[in-house]
Every structure is written in structure tokens, then in C-alpha cells.
Image (cartoon, grey):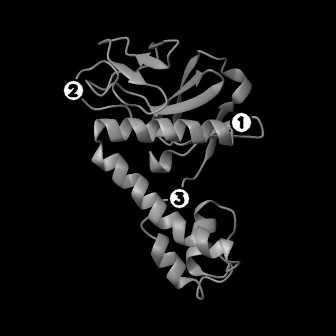
Amino acid sequence: MEFDKAVAELATLVETLERENDERALLLLQLVDAIHRPALERMAAGDFDDPTVEALLYMYEIVELADVEDDAVVLSQIEGLRRPVYSDVTEAASLAPGELSKVTLEGIEILLVNFEGEIHALRDGCPVDGNSLEGARLTAEGVLVCPWHNCAYDVRTGSRMDGEEGEGLRVVPVAQRNGSVQVAVNVA
């Protein structure tokens, strides 16, 4: 995703979360900020050897930890965080805009959705009864409609969009590298 588009979507999401008073999501954003801000401040000051900077760079796979013994503090700080491990699932060109594709990786069923040229990944299975969403309909607004119950979910966030109470879909981290679509089922 392009930087400008990501910033705009983040701003919209934060406004929505504040309006809906979603305390868990707002807490998540605050925690991400609490992890990133000190590391970025130290990076801006040129202190790249600080453990918080090393932890942040390691979390994004930008650097490898050179010496595990010296970086025990860094490892203990990020031990509880699961770093996404991405695996190839398909070629990006094989999924045209508006198309859905079901894949299985490590025994986990994933639904890939190309919405407006951007590929999203969700755990496959309607929260109502677990039936596959493979035959779902994707609307022009990015809403995935369950073929069994007409439940509606935002393909970008997994949130329920039909006004009904109930669980949303679990979003799976997705990346595109070298023409391949990759997902990280270890954190999904």
C-alpha cells in the first residue's frame, strides 16, 4: 500500500474508532505508539544502538540481531510479540480485481480478496457457523456478503457491516513481494 493511501486510511479508521468509542482498538493504537515513539525519538537523535531501536528494527525484519547475548534485553522486550512469518500462497496477477480465492496454508483456510487492486486476506469461515465464504459476493464498497446468511463484512478490517451483533472476520496479514501474494498465518 502506498504511504499516502495508508495515512489517509489510518486517519479515517481512527476517526471511526473514536466515533464508535472502540476502546480496545484505541488502546491498540496507543500501545503501538508507546512502542514506536521512544525508538523513533532515539533514531532521530542518532542512537541506533539503543535496545528499543534494535527491537523496532528487528520487529520489521529490517535488521537481524547481531549478538543474542548482548541483545537479551531486546529479546525479552519483544518475546511476547509474534513476528509475522510470511509464506507464498499465489501469484498476485492470478487474482483479478473483484475476485476471491480460497487457499489453505498450514491447515488454516484463508480467503484472498482483490478489492480495487489491493489484496486482502481473511480467515475463511462465517462466524455464524464456520461455513466457507468462498462463494461470497464482493460489493463495490468493499463489503463481503456471506453466501449462507447474508452477513456483511468489511473486506479491509473484517468488521461486521450489516448492523447485526456478532463477531467479525479475522484479518490475516498479507504482503506482496516479487509478484507473489504472501500471508502470515502464524499471527492470524
Q: Nearer the viewer, mark 2 or mark 1?
A: 2
**Left or right for 59, reference 127:** right
Where is residue 137 shown, x and y percent of the image?
Answer: 46, 11
From the image, which quarter does the C terminus lie in?
Answer: top left
Residue at 57% in and 37% down: 8
Quadrant of the image occupied by residue 174:
top right
Q: Residue furthest left?
A: 165
Q: Nearer the viewer, residue 89 or 30?
A: 30
Amino acid type shown at disc 1: Ser
Where is residue 29 shown, x and y percent of the image?
Answer: 42, 53
The residue tagged with tag 3: helix, strand or loop?
Answer: loop
Tag shown at residue 180: 1
Marks 3 and 2 sit apart, C-alpha to C-alpha, by: 31 Å
* Residue denoted by label 3: 83
* Residue denoted by label 2: 165
**Left or right for 82, reference 162:** right
Earlier along the polypeptide chain: callout 1 or callout 3? 3
Residue 170 appears in view:
no
The residue tagged with tag 2: helix, strand or loop?
Answer: loop
Marks 2 and 1 sit apart, C-alpha to C-alpha, by: 36 Å
Where is residue 16 shown, x and y percent of the image?
Answer: 39, 35
From the image, which quarter does the N terminus lie in?
Answer: top right
Amino acid type shown at disc 3: Arg
Residue at 57% in and 80% down: 51
Earlier along the polypeptide chain: callout 2 or callout 1? 2
Residue at 69% in and 38% down: 2
Q: Nearer the viewer, residue 108 or 166?
A: 166
Instruction: Check if mark 3's residue and mark 2's residue have beta carbons within 8 Å.
Output: no
Where is residue 75 shown, x and y percent of the image?
Answer: 52, 76
The residue tagged with tag 1: helix, strand or loop?
Answer: strand
Q: How many marks?
A: 3
Q: Residues within 10 Å of mark 3 (few under 14, many from 20)?
A: some
